[in-house]
Amino acid sequence: MLAISPTDRVFVLTGAGVSAESGIPTFRGVNGLWRNYRIEEVASPHAWRHDPRLVWEFYSMRRRVASAAKPNPAHIALAKLEQRLGDCLFLCTQNVDDLHEQAGSVRVAHMHGELFKSRCDRCSRPPFHDTNTYDPPVDLPQCECGGRIRPHICWFGEVPFDLDRIHAALDACTLFVAVGTSGVVEPAASFVAQVSGGARTVYAGPESPANASSFTKCYLGKAGEVLPDLLGAKCAS
Ligand code: OAD
């Protein structure tokens, strides 16, 4: 179990692996999403201009998968950690599902956006909750301003959300914990290298990430099995 003192500031970065045991596919694994879809065709501003129907087909499929998923023990362990630490925990996820919130986490920075939100691609109307699916031949959703409604997702080539808050939390952190992320996608892959020299840095996942050399220690195993012990948040059963 990780020792966490009252003076610690904990930064947790989660990736697709934390939701894998909930049945949501990762991106780069054997059955990863990027084995079956080309990023530039479904997750880029170019894709949106070129074929918005295909983009909505992809995110509609992901909405269906995510709406059937339930949090696993890793999400629950992180929610319990927030109950214990309050503001001393900063939870940053690259995931667009809402499983951290379903588990009870309240303050989650979704740096790559949220699957169940949409926004206008033209006007400044704020992102709004949207669980609809838009598969052909359904018409593509339109905003009152005439713009097109797009998924509230950070696509490749776009700037992630909440970076100011994230960098402030990285500066303050004394314990950095990454879970279930391959360590290849920037800027998240470099977060571990940005924390102060004195901070402890640990990784949890079934295999070492690409940036493993930046971590003090890697705990190898599935998030749902490793995190409850590591964070001292085992469910009573
Ligand atoms: P990846 O698919 O790149 O990596 C998933 C990681 O999860 C791998 O390192 C696996 O070893 C690990 N993993 C698999 N099962 C696990 C389990 N049960 N417990 C813990 N870890 C497990 O996913 P990310 O690193 O999250 O961006 O990908 C980062 C970004 O790349 C995503 O947010 C997405 C993608 O393209 C956008 O769409 C903008």
Image (cartoon, grey):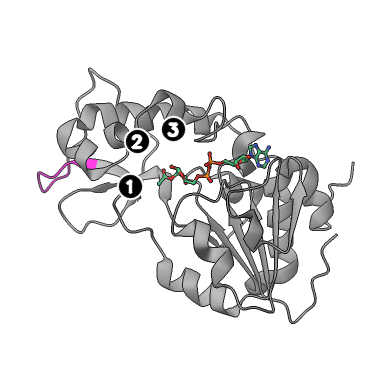
Q: Is residue 124 left or right of residue 135?
A: left
State yes or no: discs 2 and 1 in contact (Cβ < 8 Å): yes
> What whole-number distance in Å separates the C-alpha atoms at marks 3 and 1?
19 Å
Where's residue 36, x and y in %? Answer: 42, 23
Q: Cβ(mark 2) to ligand 1 < 8 Å?
A: yes
The one nearer the camera, 86 or 61, is 61
Q: Which residue is mark 1?
A: 156
Question: Is 148 contained in the magenta span?
Answer: yes
Where's residue 2, x and y in %? Answer: 82, 63
Residue at image location 17% in from the left, 41% down from the top: 148
Q: Which residue is mark 2?
A: 39
> What whole-number distance in Å separates the C-alpha atoms at marks 2 and 1?
8 Å
Q: Secondary structure at mark 3?
A: helix
Q: Cβ(mark 3) to ligand 1 < 8 Å?
A: no
Question: Is 92 contained in the magenta span?
Answer: no
In which image quadrant can residue 137 be found?
top left
Q: Amino acid at mark 2?
A: Ile
- Earlier sequence position, callout 3 versus callout 1: 3
- Earlier sequence position, callout 2 versus callout 1: 2
Tally the marks.
3
Q: Do we see residue 109 in this rendering?
A: no
In which image quadrant can residue 231 be found?
bottom right
Q: Cβ(mark 1) to ligand 1 < 8 Å?
A: yes
Residue lying farthest left?
146
The one nearer the camera, 159 or 23, is 159
Disc 2 crowd, CA 10 A, few/some/many (<14, 14-19, 20+):
some
- Magenta stretch in the rendered image: 143-149
Give ligand 1's quarter of the image: top right
Where's residue 165, x and y in %? Answer: 46, 72
Task: Give the dominant element type of the magenta stretch: helix, strand or loop.
Answer: loop
Q: Is residue 229 above or below residue 52?
A: below
Q: Which residue is mark 3?
A: 63
